[in-house]
Amino acid sequence: MSYVAMDIGGSNVRFTVANDWNSNTLEYQKKPFIRLGDPYLEVEANICRIVDNIPEEVEGLGISLAAVMDRSSKKVKTWSNNPSWNQYELVQHLSSRYKVPIVIEDDANCGAIGEYSFIKEIVKNMAYITIGTGIGCGLVLNGSIFLGENGFAGELGHVYTGNTDRNAVCSCGNKACFQSIASGPAVLKSYNSIAKTKLTSLEQVYSRYKQGESNAVMCLTDMINCISEVVYNLAMCLDISTFLIGGGVSNMGSEFIVKIEDRANERLRCFERQISIEKAQLGEFSGVCGALQLLKDHVHIKKG
Ligand SMILES: [Zn+2]
């Protein structure tokens, strides 16, 4: 008997097979997402193939997906990295094949739930912010994930950064959205344009930053400032003191995260407040852990 939790991203499928609910003993695996251009075939290749290869009987399926879900119809509303899944009836497809409890939630919320499971004895409110190709956020308030009225709570990538110098156009069509300024690709693009280079990763820019190269210092200082401003705004709006950073940026080292924390705390000093920003504990596997926690809650509620 086992439970399967997966995090389906545009590039990889991360998963775990659990025999109990203990987050500390899970073993995580990762496979590349197989692109076939058709959601039905991709579900078969990326989800069913994993589930069908588990030798024990599968008792439930928890899925974290990097897409916007319609929570009432259980359809995928939009998946920007894989638009062929837009309007796809994912849960219906899986339910017709597996007669077990199936839960699904977006990856930022799953990441927040996964990370929260490690600190829930210490804090009741936190924000989990992923900064990578895009920017997402999951909010835990009073010990529960907060979805908002339309399920869009934590759509931090489209928060307006309000600086007229920051005129980059976002994928949503608006200017100066947080992710059009501070996501990995946005900073890389900005650096390449200023420095007239063709670097291919943010890590390369970061290594130039550490060497004190002036363009890299300017671009990454702007990134640090922008992230710290958004964190500060969240701290002021929600009175949250615990922030976790996931996604590719979290791999840039504690020094980078400390700078963001210091900047936010400078602004908070006059209110005699202080926040902490830490790297997400589970790294790329936060979402898998969160999908399992969701499944656990669902199964326990059903059993009463
Ligand atoms: Zn936007």
Image (tube, rainbow, N blue to C red):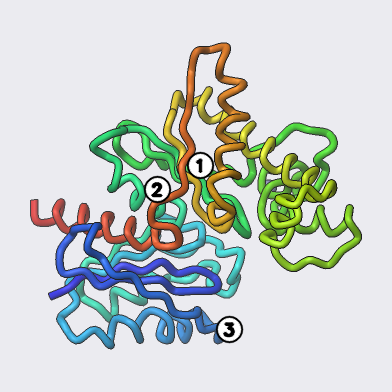
Q: Amino acid at mark 3?
A: Gly
Horizontally, residue 234 falls left or right of residue 217, namely left
Which residue is under mark 1?
A: 154
Marks 1, 3: nearer the viewer:
1
CA distance for labels 2 and 3: 30 Å
Q: Residue at x 29, y 74 (%)?
A: 95
Residue 72 against residue 129 in the figure, above or below? below
| Helix, strand or loop under label 1 | loop
Q: CA distance from mark 1 to mark 2?
A: 11 Å
Dot 3 alpha-carbon crowd within 10 angstroms: few under 14, some 14 to 19, many 20 or more: few
Q: Position of residue 66 (x, y in %)?
A: 50, 62
- The disc at residue 37 is 3
Neighbourhood count class around disc 2 (C-alpha, 10 Å): few under 14, some 14–19, many 20 upward: many
Q: Is residue 83 left or right of residue 189?
A: left
Observer able to see residue 149? no
Q: Nearer the viewer, mark 1 or mark 2?
A: 2
Q: Is residue 243 above or below residue 191?
A: above
User: Which x, y percent locates residue 17?
Assistant: 25, 73
Q: Name the quarter where the N terminus is drawn.
A: bottom left
